[in-house]
Image (tube, rainbow, N blue to C red):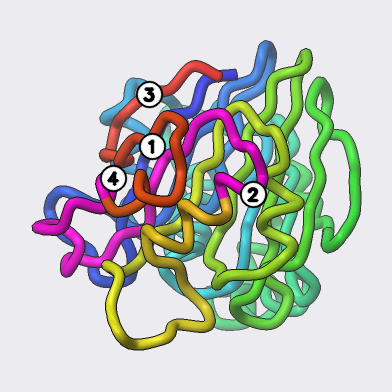
Amino acid sequence: MQLTVLGSGTCAATLQRSMASYHLQSANHSMLIDIGAGSLRRLLEAGKSYWDVGAIFISHMHIDHIGDFAPFLWATRFSPEFERTMPLKVFGPPGLSAWYSRLAAAHGDWMHSLPFDCELAEVHDTTFNYHDLEIFTLPMQHSVGANGYRFSESNRTLAYSGDTGMCENIVELARNVDVLLIECSFPDGDEEIDTHLTPAGVGKIAAAANAHKVVLTHMYPICENVDLVGACRQQYGGKIELAEDLQRLRI
């Protein structure tokens, strides 16, 4: 698998960090994990085509993780150079179908008359397959229904936290994974945060899970002048990287 970071930021987007989105390439399939605003542009900057994307995995329904979903459908529906016929599979938490219906009501009937099949699958606390991938989901400590995902292909594993606070499920999701892509929204501080993580919390999770490598992502601008990697390393002795937009990682 190859992971390309499209957006390592948050709702407070900067020129350096778009909102949350990642491209995952398996042996035979192109996928998006979250699709925050700026995803389509970053996908093109990374040399990828949104026409090739066969599946989108949504962690939760906050706008910084789904903002480019309607633009994605619009681009694949109305592009004059290409008419998509390949089916699209959209995986997301409970409420995905109701959200799609509300989105279609806001944007127009074209969302119900796509020239390709757009299949919605609500997944939560389950294991399923998408072609050559086995995917495991667990509830995260964030908004109602928030998912974390673990992707496995040929004994290689990637875990993605989505947004979460400290909880047992993120440790279980990350157990012995090759790469843990995990949110690190804020620096360590005095204020307790129930629904997001800081580097000390990430380090404790990675150590408890025996994750082989950690990639910190979903960082607010306040993190830019803080040594997040150094703070995380006080709790975890494995490999740590700071995600950057357009960064590629072989898993």
> How many other residues sit within 10 Å of disc 2, few (<14), some (14-19) or many (≥20)?
some
Q: Earlier in the sequence, mark 4 or mark 3?
A: 4
Question: Secondary structure beneath disc 4?
Answer: helix
- Tag nearer the camera, 4 or 3: 4
- Which mark identifies residue 248? 3
- The percent coordinates of residue 172 (x first, y second) are 76, 52
Q: Earlier in the sequence, mark 2 or mark 1?
A: 1
Q: Report whether 155 appears left or right of 62.
A: right
Determine whether label 1 and label 4 are within 8 Å by CB. Answer: no
Residue at mark 1 to residue at mark 4: CA–CA distance: 18 Å
Query: What's the residue at 71%, 57% (across, down)?
Result: 113
Label 1 sits on what residue type? Val
Query: Residue 94 sits in which quadrant?
Result: bottom right
Residue at mark 3 to residue at mark 1: CA–CA distance: 6 Å
Query: Residue 138 sits in which quadrant?
Result: bottom right
Query: What's the residue at 35%, 66% (across, down)?
Result: 185
Q: Earlier in the sequence, mark 3 or mark 2?
A: 2
Which portion, as a residue range, is magenta?
A: 206-230
Q: Which residue is mark 4?
A: 229
Residue at mark 2 to residue at mark 1: CA–CA distance: 25 Å
- Tag nearer the camera, 3 or 2: 2
Question: Secondary structure beneath disc 2?
Answer: helix
Label 2 sits on what residue type? Ala
- Which mark identifies residue 208? 2
Q: Which residue is mark 1?
A: 5
> Looking at the rendering, in which quadrant would you find the N terminus?
top right
